[in-house]
Amino acid sequence: AEESFLHQWQGAIRLAVTVTQLAIPTLLPTIMSMNLSPFVHYHCPCPDIYFESDAAVDAASTTAPQACLRDATQTLDINSPRTDFSLHPLSRLYFCEDCHQIRCPSCVQDEIVSYYCPNCLFEVPQATVKSEKSRCARNCFQCPICQNTLSVVSSSESAVGTQSTTATAVGPYFLSCSVCRWDSQEIGITFERPNSLAPVDWAQYCPQNALFAYHHRPIVQLQKNEEALPDVKEFEHLKEHFDKFLRGPSPPAHSNLLSVSSVSAFSRMGVNPATQQQQRADEIGKYEPEVKVPNDDVAKTQSLISVKHVNEVTTLSQRVNQLHDQPYHTSKIHPQRINLRIKRSKRCRTCRHILIKPEQKAQATRFKIKLVAMIYIPTISIVKLPKKNWPLQLGIPTQFVLKFTNPLYEEISVTLATPHQETEEQRRRGSRTSSSTDGVSSAKQSLEHKEEPKTCGKPPFLWTKQVTLLSPHFTVGPYDEVWGYDEELSSLSGATTPGSASIRSGTSGFSFKREKHNSLAAGWEAGVYEKRNNFTSILVEVVPEKEGEFKVREWFPILVTYTYRPDDDNKMDTAGDAVDAVDDDASSTHSSVYTDEDGNVSHSHKAGAARHSDDEKSEEGLKSYSFWTVVGLGEVVARDATV
Amino acid sequence: MASASASASAAVALTTAGASAFPPLHTLTRRPSIYGTEDRIVLDIGSLYIKCGFSGEPRPRHIIPVFAGARKSRSPEGEGYRVAGEFAELFKLDVMSDAQALQYLEDRLTQILHDIYFRYLLTDPKQRKIIICESPLAPVCVKQVVAKVLFQNFQVPSISWAPLHLLALLTTGLTTGLVVDCGNLESTVLPIYAARPLTPFIRTTPLAGSSLTSRLRDLLLEHGRIVLPSNLHASAAPRNPVPEKLLTHALLEDVKTRFLFVSPVSARHRSPRRRSSARPSPAEQDEDEDEDMTFAFATDVKYPVRLDDQHGQNDGNSVATLIIPGWVRERAAEVLFEGDEDEASVAGCILDVLVKLQPDLRRPLISSILLIGGTTLLPGFETRLHQELLHTLRNPSELERIRYARHLSGVAESIAFLDDPEAPHGGSGRVFMGNCRGWVGGSLIGSLKSSGPEVLKEKFVGMVPDWSTGSGNAEQQSAVVV
C-alpha cells in the first residue's frame, strides 16, 4: 500500500534562469485591502486532531484508507474550501519539538490556566467565575452601544474638563464611553460614588415599582438585579414545577421527562392505547406562572413604524448583550459587565508536550514555555521589486522577491517546489536534472537534501497560472544575535551572491542560462537576489492568468523543504532534543528524482512531505522538514487598468 | 492544575470579596457545587446563530453569529482574527448532498466551537457534558458532524440530544402545545401532546428568515435608492438605484433584524383576486406592490452605508445613504404569509397540521400556539399570524375552504398564543425571548438532571441517535397509518 501511495507522487520543477535588474527591494505597501492583500500563509495539515478516535475506529481496517488519508493531507488543494482553515500566518503557528511538526491553533489542545478581567487585569478565582457568570464583578462595564470599555467619570469633572483629582470631582458619577461618546446619563443612570461596588439597597428608592426601579437603579444594581429579572424567577419556578413532577409518585419509567417523549414511548402511544397509568403520569399539574410579562409587541411595532433615525434601533450585536429582553430601542439597553478572559496553555495532541504555557498572573505577559513556529521555521516574506508592476496585471510576467529568514543557529539549505503542471510552457523549459547540484561544494552537497519537488498527479491542481522559481535551491545563513546590532557584519558571512554577481556582469537571461550549464556551481544559486546575514532573497516570476471571472487574486502554493545539521552546542533550547536515529534505508529514501527532457518525472521514494515523524530525515545527522506555503500576491488587475 | 490555580488565587478572591463586602449574586439560584462542573453545556446550533450557555441558567450566555469571526481576516494593522467574516450560513438544508460542504461545516464548526469554549464560555470542554437542542428535521449528517467535532476534537465526555420544540414548550410550564419554529432556513410546525412530539404530523416550509432576506434584497434592488456622498443637500442629491454588490448578506441581516416589522393586516386581503392560491403573475405582483405602497404608513429609513473603492480602501468620507422605503420595511415580511400549494405559508403550515391531527386534539393545540425562533421576533409577527389564521378560517378562498375550513369549523375562536399573558393557557408572557426558548428548555432539563438520548465519548462510532433512523422507524410508519 505504501508503494502505491508513493507512486502517486510525481515531481517536477521548472528551473528557468533569467537576469533581473539590480535593485533595492522595498517592502510592499502593507495591505491593499482586507482580502486582496499579499500574504504568505503556512499550511498545517492538522494530522492529529482525530488521531485517537481514528485509531480506534480504523484499528481493524487496512492500510489503504490510511494511505488515502495521508495522501489527502500531503497534497495541497488550494481550491478546496478547507484550506481556509489550514492556512495560517506564521505568527499563529507553533512547533512541536518532539514531533518535529508545525502545530496550528486548531490542532493543539487548549487548557485553561487562569481567568482574568481584560480591563482591570484582576485574576478571578474559578469559583467566582461560576457565580459571576464569567463576568467581572468589579468596576468594569462595557458600552451598550459599541461594546468598548466604559470609564467612570464625575459629571462635575467632565463639565470643567479638569484632569485632576477627586478633590473637585464630586457629585453624580456616570459611566462614559470614550469611543462612541455614549454615557449612562442618557438612560438616566448616575450614582453617588465612583466606587460602584458599594452595595446599595436599590429597593429603597422605589419599592413599589420593581420595573421602574430596575431601569432607574444606580449602577451597582446593574449587577445585583440580574438575579431579580423576571426570567430568573420564572426559571426557578419552572424548575420547581417540573421537579415536583419528576420526583413525584409517578412510576420510575416516567421519571425522565424526555424518555416519555422518546420514539418508543411515542409509538407506544400511537400504536397501543395509553394505559391508565400512563395517563396519570401525563398529568403534570396545572402551572401557574410566577411572573407575567406584558406583551409589548404592539408598542414595538408602533415605534418601528415611526422610526426616524437609524440609531434609535439597536443592532443585533447590541441586543444579544442583553439577552433577557433583547430590546429594540437604544434607550433600553444597559451597560453590561465585561466578559472575563482566560489564559491558556497549549499542548501537542500527539505527544502531549506543552507548547505554550503562560505565566499565571494576568499582568504578566511572559511565557514559561513558548514554542512558536517562528523560531523553528524560516520566515518567508514577499518583497516587491522596484519598477515592477504592482498590483499584478493580467498576463504580464512579473518578478518579485521571496525573502527567507532563518531563525536557526545553523545554516539551512532550502528546496522549493511548486506543484506539477502539465503545460507546454513547463515542458519547454521545465527540464531539470538532478545533476544540477553536482558542482556544489561538498559541504553544501552534504547539506543539500536531494529530495525533489513533490507533487501529486491526482487530484490535479486546478489553477493554471505560471509560477517560476528562479532558484529552487539555496542556502540561508545561520542566525546570529550580532547581526541584530551591526548591519555591516553581513559581509562577513562570506557568501557571495551569485545572482547579483552575474547581474553586475550584465549578462542577459540567455547567457545566464548558459552559465548555468557551463558552470553548475555558479548556477546552483542562480536567481538568488540577495543573500546576507540570516536571510536569502530569491526571485520568483509569475504570469497571472485569469481563471474564471471570480478569480481576482493571485496565489499559488510552494512546498518548502529545509535541511540543517543540528548542532546541540549552539542550540538555545533543545535540552534533551537528541538527533533522531539514523534511518536505516536513508540512502534509498533520499534518492533523487530524475526528470528527463520531456518533463516526465520518475517517482521519488519517500516523496511525501514531512508530515509524519518517519519522514524526519537524519542522514548524517541532518534534519529536514517540509511544509506547504501559499503565497498570495494580492489583487490582479486587468492589463488595461494601469496602462 | 485546577486545584493549584484555585488555591493560588484564593487570597485574591478573599481580598476582593472582603473589600467590597459584596454578597454573591447567586443567592436566588440553587448552586450545586462551587465549580459547578456538573452543569452541562447547552448548545442550540442554528444555521446562523449558535446559542450557548450553561444548564441551570435562565438565559444563554451568548448568542454567537456563525458569520462573524468564522474565517480568517486580516486587518490593515496585521492579523485580526475576530473581524466579521464572510456571511455564510453554517449549513444549508441540502448539506447532505455535498461531501465537501460537510467537511467545510466541520472546519467551521471546529473553529466556532473553539471560540465558544475558550472565548465565551471559558470552560474546559473535557469536563462538561453537553445537551444539544435539535430540530426534529435537522439533517442527520449535520448532527453527526457536530458530534464528531465535539467528541474527537474537543473530547467532551457525553452528548445528549433533546428535541428543540419540546424544550421550548417546557419553558411555558405546559406539555401540550403547537410549537411553531420560524428560524432561518425553514419554518417548522410540530404538535406536542403530553410531552410527546407528534413527529409524523410535522409540517415545514422553507418560508423563513432566509427567504425573508432574499425578498428584502429583491425589494431593495428595485425600490431602494442610494444617495452617494456629495455636498448637495439631502433633498437635492440624486438618488441612484442600489448596486447589487452593496447589498451584502451582512447588510441585509442588519436591516432585517433592525428595521423590518410585520404589518398587522395584509393589504391583500382587500383584493378578492388574491383569494386564489396560485402564484401571481408578474403584472399582478406589480399591482400587489402598488397596493403595498399605498397602504403602508411606515417612515423611510436612511441607512448609512460605507462605500469601499475598488481596492477596498476606505477614505473615511465615503458614507452613502441607503434609503429604505417604509413600505418595504413593512411589507418585506409578507413573503412569510404568501404560501402556495408547494410552499405553504407559515399560517398554512399550522392549518395543515391541524387538519392532519385527530379532531379532539385540534382545539387544545390551536389554543396553545408557541412561537419560537428568531424570525418570530419580528415585531407584529404574532398579531399578523393570528390575523392570517382567522382570515383563512373565516373568509376562506375556494381552495382554502376545501383544504382547511371544512375540517376546522369552530376552531377559529380558540386560536391563542402561549406567550400572550392574556390568553387562556397564557403563561408568563415573553419572559423568555422566542429565539432563546429552545435553549432555555435545554437548560431547564439539564438542571433537572434529565435529558434525551445520550452518547458517551467512549461509545461514539460516528452514529448519532435520531428518530428517523434506527429501530424507531417501523413503529413510526405504523403510527402514521394509525
Image: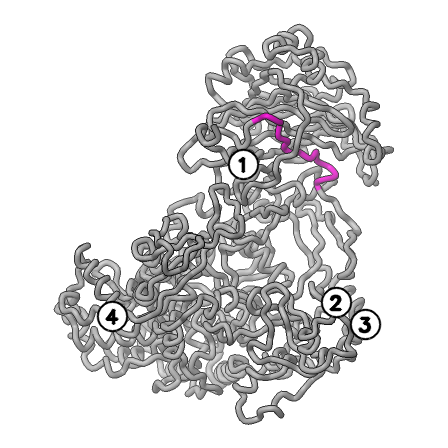
Residue assigned mark 4:
B295
Q: Is residue A381 a member of the stretch shown in magenta?
A: yes
Residue assigned mark 1:
A634
> Which amino acid, by three-letter code, is at mark 3?
Ala
Instruction: Describe residue B261's horizontal placement relative to residue A370 as left or right.
Output: left
Can residue B471 be seen?
A: no
Tags 4 and 3 both on a single chain: yes
Seen as rendered, the residue at the extreme top is A518
Q: CA distance from mark 1 to mark 3?
A: 53 Å
Report in which chain the residue with disc 2 lies.
Answer: A
Residue assigned mark 2:
A122
The residue positioned 56% from the left and 14% from the top of the image is A431
Q: Secondary structure at mark 4?
A: helix
Q: Is residue A411 a member of the stretch shown in magenta?
A: no
Disc nearest the viewer among 4 and 3: 4
Tags 2 and 1 both on a single chain: yes
Coloration mode: one colour
